[in-house]
Amino acid sequence: MQLTVKLFAFFRDGRFKEEGREYPAGTKVGEIVADLGIDPDEVGVVMINSLQSSLKATVAEGDNLAIFPVIGGG
Amino acid sequence: MTEKIFRVNMTDLTTSVEAVPAAWAGHGGRGLTSTIVAAEVEPTCHPLGPKNKLVFAPGLLSGTIAANSGRLSVGGKSPLTGTIKESNAGGTSAQFLARCGCKALIIEGQPKGDVWYSLAVTPQGVTISQEKELIGKGNFAVAETLANRLPGKLGLITIGSAGEMRMASANISVKDPDGGLRSHGRGGLGAVMGSKKVKFISIDPQDGKVEIADTEKFKEANRAFAKALVDHPVSKALGQYGTNVLVNIINESGGLPTKNFTLGQFDGHEKISGETMHDTINLRGGKVKHNCHPGCVIQCSQIYNDASGKKLTSGFEYESIWAMGADCCVDNLDQIAEADRLMDDIGIDTIETSVAMGVAMEAGVLPFGDGAGILRILQEDIAKGTPLGRIIGNGAGSVGRAFGVTRVPVVKNQAIPAYDPRSIKGMGITYATSTQGADHTMGYTIATNILGVGGSVNPLVKEGQVELSRNLQIATAAIDSTGMCLFIAFAALDDATCLPALIDLINARFGIALTGDDVVNLGKYILKTERAFNTAAGFTNVDDRLPEFFYTEPVPPHNVVFDFSGEEIDTFWNF
C-alpha cells in the first residue's frame, strides 16, 4: 500500500522531508521507523492524519504518517 | 549581602532601602511581585495612574551559579488586561539585581509634567537622574548610547517609543550578555514604566555577591540539576532548532492558528519552520545556539543574519514567528525577522502586535500575506504614534473595537498565542482561566497534549484537560518564583532527579528545608493571590471564557469547536 511519510528536525538528516512510500498492508509504525533506520527511543511523537498515534499503530492505504523526535519549545 | 527592598517614589523623586517584611521573605520572582502588587496596589486603580506600581524581582536563585536561573519578573496592574500581571524575561538584569542585594525594586507614584528620568541601581540603593538625550529613541539606540556613556558591563532595563507612548502592548526590554534584547512582552508593563516617566534602569552590582547558606550542598545540587537539564532530549532540540521547531509539529496537529484563527494549518509552514530557520542560520554564518543569560545550559536563542550575513535579530521565537507568519499568512522568514527586530526596537510585544495585525488584515486595513505592509505600519505608524499606530499598538482587542471585527482572539483583552484552543483543548482551559489573560506560558499543556512530555492527554477530547492545566499552572507559578527559565519544566516533567535537585538548590541557598509539598502550596498561593486581586478589580468567573467564535466556528482540519461549558471551566478553581 502507498502512504506519505513525513520526517522532522534531525530525522531529516540523511533521509528526506516527505516521501510517498510503499509498505505491505498491516505494517505498524514501529516497523516503518525501523525500516528508516531511526532509533525508536528517539521518537517523541507520531501522528497519523494529524491525530496523535504510537509506534504500535497500524497504518492504512493513503495515510499521512508524521514522525518527530522528542522536541519542545513554547 | 543582606537582601533589601529598594523603593523609588516618582511623585517626589525620593528613594529608600528598606528591610524585607517577614511576609515577603520566602518569596522571589513572580511570587514576590504578585505578593507586593496584591499588598500595595489598589485593584481598581488606573494602570497608568500614580496608584499603580511597577515591581521588579529576581528569582529565589537568581545571581547564583545555578543553571538557567537568570529570569527577571516584573509585575503590576496591566493596562492591557486590567488584571494583575507578571511577565518574566532573561538577560543579565536579574542576576545583577540579586547581586545588588535587591530582593525587589518597587517604582511607585508619578511625576508631574513632561520630564523623563533614569534610575541607577547599585548595592547602595537607587539614584534618579533626569534624562533628555534618549527620549524618543528606540531600544537599540538606548543600549548602544549607554554602552558608551556608562562604564563597565551594566545591566540595562529599558522602554522604547511604545512604552513612552503608553501603548497597552509595550514591552520592558532587558539587555542580554551580547547587547541583544530580551522582552517582558505580555500585558503592556512597558506602558506602566512609561507612565512613571522612567526611560531606563541601569544596574551595577559592583563586587556584590549572593550569599549561599551551604556552598557545598549548593554545588552538588547544581551538578545534579544541570545534568538533568542537559540530558533531556528536549533541551538538545531547543539548542539545535530553537523554539521555532514547533511550527511544523503544531501545524501537523492542526492547531496552528492561521489567517486570523480561521484555519488550523498554514500552507507556508515549511518556509517559516525551525528546520528552515536552522539551515538558513548556518548558511548565512549566524549562530544556531545562543544564551540569553550566563549560566543557561539549553541555549534556545540564536543569531539570525540577513542574506548579506549581517545580524538581523536574536531570540527569534516560535510564537513571534507564528503570529507574523501563519496568523498573518506571511511565509517570508526574512520579513518576519525584520519585523521581530523592529518590534524589539520599538519595544512592543511581538505576539500582541502581530495578532493585532491579523485582526487588522481581517478588517481590510492591509491584505493577508502583506509582509511589506506590516513592516511599513511598524515603522510609519506604530513607531511614530499615528492614530492607526496607536490603535494597533493597543492590541488585538483595540483593533477589533476600532474596526468592528467580531473574530478577535483575546481573553481578558490579551491576544491568544500560537495554539488553537479548539483543536488543543488544554490550552483553551489555560487561556480561559489564567489570572493574566490568554498566555501559553501560564500552563503549557502542549507538553502533554502534543509533545508527549509528562505523559499524554489527547488534545481533541475534553477529559483530563482541566486537571492538566491546573497542575501545570500551579507548577509554573512556583517555577516562575525561582528565577528559573520555564524550559526546565520539560526535564522536571520527565526526569525524577530534576525537581528534587531544584528544591535542594533553594534549600542550600537559604539554609531551609522546603519539601515538594511546600513548592506545590507556593504555586497554589500565588494563583489564589492573583485571582483575589482580579476579583477585587471587578473580574468574575464570566471573564474566564473564550471569545464567542471559538464556540461556534469549527476549525479545520479536525472541524472542532471549543466545547467546554462555563461550569466545566470553573472547576479549574477547585483547589
Image (cartoon, coloured by chain):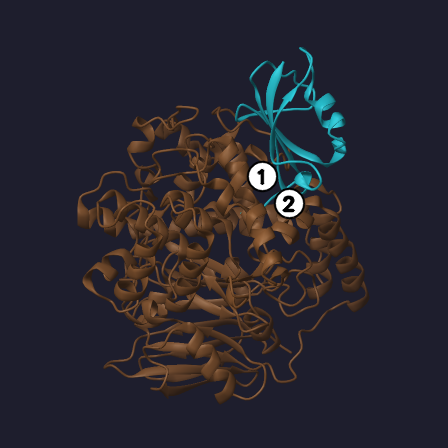
What percent of the width, then of the height, locates residue B51? 30, 68
Q: Given the image, what chain letter belongs to the residue carrying mark 1? A: B
Residue B87 versus residue B515 in the image, above or below: below
Residue B319 versus residue A12 in the image, above or below: below
In front of the other: B71 or B30: B71
Residue B99: which numbered mark, if any?
none
Amino acid bearing label 1: Ala
Identify the chain drawn in cyan: A
Pointer 2: what residue? B490
Identify the chain drawn in brown: B
Report the residue at 43% width, 26% height from top.
Answer: B557
Amino acid bearing label 2: Phe
What percent of the width, then of the height, locates residue A7? 63, 34
In front of the other: B25 or B418: B418
Residue B214 versus residue B574 in the image, above or below: below
Gap in angstroms between the C-alphas marked 1 and 2: 8 Å
Element at label 1: helix
What percent of the width, then of the height, locates residue B102? 55, 75
Q: How many dots with numbers?
A: 2
Residue sitting at the far front: B308
Pointer 1: what residue? B447
Element at label 2: helix
Near mark 1 (Cα within 10 A), the count class, few <14, some 14-19 or many ≥20, is many
Residue A51 versus residue B372 in the image, above or below: above
Tell me: B265 left or right of B28.
left
Q: Given the image, what chain letter belongs to the residue carrying mark 2? A: B
Near mark 2 (Cα within 10 A), the count class, few <14, some 14-19 or many ≥20, is many
- Quadrant position of residue B541: top left
What percent of the width, then of the height, locates residue B544? 35, 39
| Residues marked 1 and 2 touching at CB (< 8 Å) | yes
